[in-house]
Amino acid sequence: MALVVQKYGGSSLADADKIKNVSERIARAKENGNRVVAVVSAMGDTTDELIELAGQVSDSPDLRELDVLLSTGELRSCALVALRLNSLGYPAISLSGAQAGIRTDSQYGMAKISSLEPQRIMDELDDGMIVVVAGFQGITPGMDTTTLGRGASDLTAIALAAGLGAVRCEVYTDVDGIYTADPRLVPKAAKLDEISFEEMLELASYGAKMNPRSIELGMVYDTPILVASSFSDVSGTLIHGDADMNKNVGEMRNRVSGIATDTNVAKITLQGVKDRPGIAASLFEPLADVGISVDVIVQNASVGGTTDLTFTVKRDDLNRASEVVQRVAEDLGSTGFVTALGLAKVSVVGTGMQDAPGYASTMFRTLADEGINIEMITTSEIRITCLVSEDAVGPASRALHTAFDLDVG
Amino acid sequence: MALVVQKYGGSSLADADKIKNVSERIARAKENGNRVVAVVSAMGDTTDELIELAGQVSDSPDLRELDVLLSTGELRSCALVALRLNSLGYPAISLSGAQAGIRTDSQYGMAKISSLEPQRIMDELDDGMIVVVAGFQGITPGMDTTTLGRGASDLTAIALAAGLGAVRCEVYTDVDGIYTADPRLVPKAAKLDEISFEEMLELASYGAKMNPRSIELGMVYDTPILVASSFSDVSGTLIHGDADMNKNVGEMRNRVSGIATDTNVAKITLQGVKDRPGIAASLFEPLADVGISVDVIVQNASVGGTTDLTFTVKRDDLNRASEVVQRVAEDLGSTGFVTALGLAKVSVVGTGMQDAPGYASTMFRTLADEGINIEMITTSEIRITCLVSEDAVGPASRALHTAFDLDVG
C-alpha cells in the first residue's frame, strides 16, 4: 500500500464543521487504499490568539514557555480530527510531535529538526490506524517541547513524507494551488499544474504563501508536494523535481513561471561607512546572531573612502534590527542610519531564465513604462527582484504578468 | 528550605489578570524562602468548552483522544503562569504531567497514578526554579497522555506534595475554606479553621466541592492540606491528621463538624427480585465494570421470597446505569425497575459521632419536625446520610445546622 502524507492548514480546520470536512477527506484517502498520515495546524487564528494572550502576561515572553503554549493549538486540532475519524468508523490516533518522533535542537520558536524517529507512526500504520500528527512542533533531547517557526506545519508534513518514504506530500490549504501571481493583485493570474522545486523555492522565499524550508526539504529528498484546496476537488499544483519538469520544457511557451510579491519589507541604510574589508561581516553577523534574516543588500560605489550600505529585513524585524545597527554603527565609522517602510518586493521567477538573456531588461523596461521607480535590484539564477514603492506592487505585478505572457482569460 | 506545593483552580486562572494575581501569590511563597511547586488547572471553563467541542465532532468521543484534547487546557495555563513568573523576574519552568513524572495506568478519562518519578522537578528546584506543573494529567507506560478525572488537579498537587515531602499542600480556589455547610443554602454557616482528614473525606464524598481521592491521598501520606481563597488573604481551613486534631477535642463544644449536601443523585429501584444469595453481586458487579459508582443501597425485607432493591447513582450516570440494569434484570428474576430524579442527599459528619449516641435520632427528629420525608438512610462511623426530596435540601440543611449547634452570627 502506498503511504500518503496530507497536511491541513489552520483555515481548513477553523471550526467543528471544517474539522468534519477535513476528516472526510482524510477518510477518502484511506478508502482509496493508502496508508495515511495527516499533519494538522492549529484551528483558525489560534496561534495568533495565543501569542496575544502571552503578550498580556509578559512583555518579552520566555521562548521555552511560549513554545509550550503555542504547541497546544496543534494538539487540540489533531485530537479533534482523530475524534472525528473514529466517530466515522475509521480507527485513528493523534500523536504529538514528540510521539511522532520529531526530534529537534533547543532553539525555541524556530527549532530545527535534527532527526526523525518514526517507529511509533510505523507501528500505528501497521495496526491499520490513520495517524494524525500535530504539526509545527518537536521535542528536544531533554524532552522539552519546541516549535519549528511560523508556517512550519508544512515542514513537519514534508519531513514525515520524506522520512517515511511517502509517494507524495499533499498540502491542503484555502487556495487551489500555486498561481502565476497573487490573484488578488493580478486578476489574470493562472493556476499552475506543476512547478519545479527550484522555482517554487524562489516564489516561496519572495512572497508566495508557503514555507521555503519545506520546499527545500522536499527538494533535498525529492518528495513531490501537491498543493491544493481543502474546500474543493480542483486538481492543485504539483511541485516536483526537474527530471519530470524537463520533459515539458519543449511545450513551455514561456520560461517565466510566476511573479512573486512581498510587502513585509523594511529598508535600513547605514550612511558614511568606511570602505574597508570586513564591514559587511561586522554588520551582518550580529544580525544573524539574533535570528534576523537580511535580504536584498546593496553597497554603493565608494566615494572618498566612505560608502552607503543598504539592506532589507522583514518589517516585523525592523525594531530589533535597528537596535543591532545602532550598536554596531559606531564601530563601522558610520555617520548614522535611516530606515524606511512603504516598500515591496516584486520578483520574476523561472527556470528558463538561466539559459536565456533579456529577462532583466524586459523587467526593467516594463516597470519604467509604468513609471515605477526601482529602488534596489537583486537576482539569483532563476529570479530577478526589484524593490519598489508599496503602492506600485499591484500595477507592477499586472504589467509584468502581461509582459511575460502569463495572462489568461 | 521548606518545599511547598500550591494548587490553583480554574476560577483562579480564568483570564490574564487572574493569571497575574496567581503568579504574584506564587512569587510571594518563593520570597518567603520556600522551594515552590505550583499545580494549575485549566483556565475558567476551558475543560467544559473542550468537552462541548469534542461533542460537536463525535457522539461518543474516543477516550484516548478526549484526554489529548482536555490535557491542553492545563498545558496552556502552566505555560502562561511560567511566562508571567519569568516576566516578574522569578525563574520558572512549566512541566506537563509527563515531564513532572506523573505515571498512570491507561484508563483514559479516569486514570490512576501508578508512580511518581519527580527527578525533573527536583533538578529544576535545585536550579532555583519555580516549577509550574499541569494538573489533571499523566502519562501511560506507552507514553500516551491520560487525564485523572474531573477535579483531579487537586490529586496531582497532593500526590506531588506527598511524593516530594512537602510541608503542606495549599489548595487555592474561589472560596475561603471549608464551611460547616454550603453557605448558599445555610446563611449561618461558618468557616472551619481545621478539620480532620476523615471528616473532610466524608464531607467531600457527600457533596463538598473537593476531590475525595485527593483527601484520601493526603490522609494516607499524612500531608496537611490548606484550602484557601486565591482572591483574599483570609486564613483558610487546614485539613490534617487526627493526631493534631485530638488536642483540640477538649475545646470542641460540638462533635458534628459539618453538613454536606449533594443534589447529583438519581434513584433506581429493582422490583420483585428473587431473594437468594448473590443477587447484589450480580447487579453491582456489571455496574462497577462500566465505572459507575453506586452509593446508598437499601434492600427491603423479603416478602413471599421476593424483595425490592433500591440504590442511588450520580444523576449523570443514570442513563448508563439504566442500560446495565435493563440487561441484568431478567437474570435476577426482577419484575421491572423504576428510576427517580428530584432527590438529594443531606449528611451530618463529625468524628465525635462514633463515640456518642443520639446523633441519628436528633437528625431524624429534626427532619420530622420540618415535615421532611426521609426516603433512604445510610451511615458510616462518622456520618449519617438521609435521602430527601430535592426541594427539602435547603430547609433540611438549615434545620440540622441549628440543631447541631453550628450556627454563627
Image: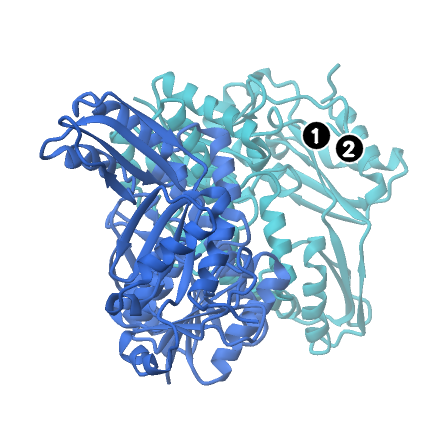
Chain colours: A cyan, B blue
Vertical arrangement, residue B334 with respect to residue A343, above or below: above
Vertical arrangement, residue B267 with respect to residue A401, above or below: below
- Regarding residue B228, the answer to whether it shows in the image is yes
Residue B280: x and y in percent read 17, 36
Per the image, label 1 sits on a secondary structure element best described as: loop
- Taking depth in this image into account, of A127 and A188 the one nearest to the observer is A127
Vertical arrangement, residue B14 with respect to residue B25, above or below: above
Residue A397 has which mark? 2
Q: Looking at the rendering, which quadrant does residue A338 occupy?
A: bottom right
Q: Do the residues at pointers 1 and 2 share their chain?
A: yes
Count of marks overlaid on the render: 2
Residue type at mark 1 is Ala
Q: Which quadrant of the rendered structure holds the N terminus of chain A?
A: top left
Task: Indicate which disc, 1 or 2, sits on the residue closer to the N terminus.
Answer: 1
Residue type at mark 2 is Ser
Residue B32: x and y in percent read 48, 84
Q: Residue furthest left?
A: B277
Per the image, the residue denoted by label 1 is A181
- Count residues near mark 2 (Cα–Cα under 10 Å), then give few for <14, some for 14-19, many for 20+: many
Name the residue: 55% across, 53% down. Answer: B44
Name the residue: 33% across, 35% down. Answer: A164
Q: Residue furthest right?
A: A371
* Chain of residue at mark 1: A
- Count residues near mark 1 (Cα–Cα under 10 Å), then give few for <14, some for 14-19, many for 20+: many
Vertical arrangement, residue B206 with respect to residue B298, above or below: below
- Verify CB contact (< 8 Å) between mark 1 and mark 2: yes
Q: Looking at the rendering, which quadrant does residue A277 occupy?
A: bottom right
